[in-house]
Amino acid sequence: EQHRELPIQGVFTDSRQIKQGSLFVPLVGERFDGHAYAESVLKDGAGATLWQRDRGEAPAGAVIVVDDTLAALQTLAEAYLAEVGCRVVGITGSNGKTTTKDMVYTLLSTTYKVHKTGGNFNNHIGLPLTILEMPADTEIAVLEMGMSGRHEIERLSQIARPDVAVITNIGEAHLLQLGSRHEIARAKVEIISGMKPGGLLIYHGDEPLIPMVLGEAETVKPEGLGTFTFGLDHSNDDYPTGMMFHSKGIIFTSLLHPEEGLDLPLLGQHNVINCLAALAVARHFGITEENIRTGLTGLHLTGMRIEQIVAPSGLTILNDAYNASPTSMKAAIDALHSLKGYHHK
């Protein structure tokens, strides 16, 4: 009773990173159990701790007993997101999720107060923590959603309730776990299962598996779902109409941006395609052409995604070490091939 109303400053799951006055969520894994640290984090300044009912006797102090600490973390995130009342952009795909997320964040930030997934905090633990770290005045949350199997993105979508969902592509990542690209497509399309009615799905239209899965009877679709496609093929709602490669990036035009070229400070044709997805999100939220150009100029990406580094000798190094799937490797080689110096060797 004495802890019925507790002022909590935040939420954390790592006992080594105590946040004073915050709620500790002790998670249980195959090789660890956060409950072993609950007593010590309370002594060191945590405001309260959750405690899973089947973990024995709880320590003294501000303890909230729940059936499942992970489920409680996810429920907390859902409740906080509803309380903040911001709009949500969910982003998934085999490759390009983080780059597209960074682009969307940068473009939307020219006009709105935006919160985004840090690094690749994109799973069943990282996504709730990202939401719970969101400032109360956030207007749009840009949330990356990753997975290693079926029904994982479905749960993330149910937590986040996206207004807009983006599927960057369907690649070979998780082929071992899921068995086929068709199954990977089904797993990625789960992002629409928790979408709000009247939401917008933006997807890579060059990939025939996505509309195929959307047409399957078992695919859960929100009421009034709108769609927008991007890609290289001219059947898409937006596609590149011209590209000029230079040492710092690409200047391109597209069907919906036909006049003055957009200057993208990133290497690789694949990043133009990622940018088309981000532009579709920006247009949906009413970002002006001027702010789109301003946003692209100041683009900053998460590291190791075709990151261009100049060595002391003047040699250009492309650091694309984050992902080594066949799709991302091909994109990196294509980006290298587009650089002027490549043709001199």
Image (cartoon, helix red, strand yellow):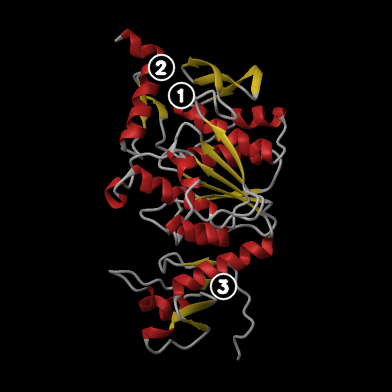
Numbered circle sitting on residue 338: 2
Q: Is residue 40 visible?
A: yes
Work out how far the residue at label 1 is from the one at label 3, CA to CA, in angstroms: 47 Å
Quarter in which the C terminus is drawn: top left
At a point 36% along the width and 34% down the height, the residue shown is: 328
- Tell me the mark number nearer the camera, choosing from 2 and 1: 1
Q: Mark 3: which amino acid?
A: Gly
Residue where numbered disc 3 is placed: 21
At a point 71% along the width and 27% down the height, the residue shown is: 290
Q: Are marks 2 and 1 in contact (CB under 8 Å)?
A: yes
Left or right relative to 232: residue 321:
left
Q: Secondary structure at mark 1?
A: helix
The x and y percentages for residue 8 are 60, 73
The x and y percentages for residue 26 are 42, 73
Q: Using the image as rendered, state which of residue 180 and residue 70 is in the foreground.
A: 180
Q: Using the image as rendered, state which of residue 14 and residue 67 is in the foreground.
A: 67
The x and y percentages for residue 135 are 64, 57
Q: Mark 1: which amino acid?
A: Gln
Q: Disc 1 or 3, which lies upstream in sequence? A: 3
At a point 50% along the width and 37% down the height, the residue shown is: 301
Q: Mark 2: which amino acid?
A: Ser
Q: Are marks 3 and 2 in contact (CB under 8 Å)?
A: no
- Badge 2: few (under 14), some or many (20 or more) residues near its Cα, within 10 Å? many
- Tell me the mark number nearer the camera, choosing from 1 and 3: 1
149 to 257, vertically: above or below: below
Q: Disc 3 or 2, which lies upstream in sequence? A: 3
150 to 94, vertically: above or below: below
Q: Disc 2 or 1, which lies upstream in sequence? A: 1
Residue where numbered disc 1 is placed: 269
Q: Secondary structure at mark 3?
A: loop
Quarter in which the N terminus is drawn: bottom right
Quadrant location of residue 69?
A: bottom left
